[in-house]
């Protein structure tokens, strides 16, 4: 059951990509979409005493699936997040 944690994007951005992203990830992992959990914790990033805009950081928690699946999974997530034009 892949659990994907997003930081540095907004709730609205995650809502936009959640359905097509999970469908693609399910195809890659050869499992149902109901196996996925997407999480967006509230995070504040601070540097040099100032609150700063965060860069996207995605953490994936899952059982090992092999390098090919990892690479395809990472590429899919990267493609969706990069479409937002974030730093």
Image: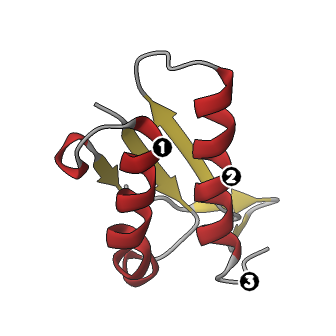
Query: Which residue is tagged 1?
Result: 28
Q: CA distance from mark 3 to mark 2?
A: 16 Å
Q: Position of residue 54 (x, y in %)?
A: 67, 66
Residue visible at 73% across and 83% down in the picture: 85
Instruction: Name the N-terminal-most of marks 3 and 1.
Output: 1
Q: Position of residue 50 (x, y in %)?
A: 73, 69
Closer-to-camera residue (38/52): 38
Q: Position of residue 38 (x, y in %)?
A: 33, 53
- In the image: residue 9, left or right of residue 1: right
- In the image: residue 70, left or right of residue 62: right
Q: CA distance from mark 3 to mark 1?
A: 24 Å
Mark 2, other Cα within 10 Å: few <14 / some 14–19 / many ≥20: few
Under circle 3, the secondary element is: loop
Q: Visible in this render: residue 40?
A: no
Which of the two discs, 2 and 1, sits closer to the camera?
1
Under circle 1, the secondary element is: helix
Closer-to-camera residue (19/37): 19
Closer-to-camera residue (43/11): 11
**Does 32 sit above or below residue 24?**
above
Query: Split into 4 quadrants, where in the image is the N terminus?
Result: top left
- Residue 79 appears in which quarter of the rendering? bottom right
Asked if marks 3 and 2 touch (Cβ < 8 Å), the reply is no
Query: Which residue is tagged 3?
Result: 85
Query: Which residue is tagged 2?
Result: 75
Residue visible at 71% across and 72% down in the picture: 82
Q: CA distance from mark 2 to mark 1?
A: 11 Å
**Does 53 sit above or below residue 49?**
below
Instruction: Name the N-terminal-most of marks 2 and 1.
Output: 1
């Amino acid at each position: 059951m892949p659990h994907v944690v997003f930081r540095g994007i907004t709730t609205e951005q995650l809502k936009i990509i959640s359905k097509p992203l999970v469908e693609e990830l399910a195809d890659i992992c050869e499992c149902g979409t109901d196996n996925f959990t997407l999480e967006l914790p509230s995070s504040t990033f601070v540097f040099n005493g100032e609150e700063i805009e965060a860069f996207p950081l995605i953490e994936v928690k899952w059982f090992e699936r092999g390098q090919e699946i990892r690479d395809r999974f990472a590429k899919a997530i990267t493609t969706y997040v990069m479409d937002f034009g974030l730093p």
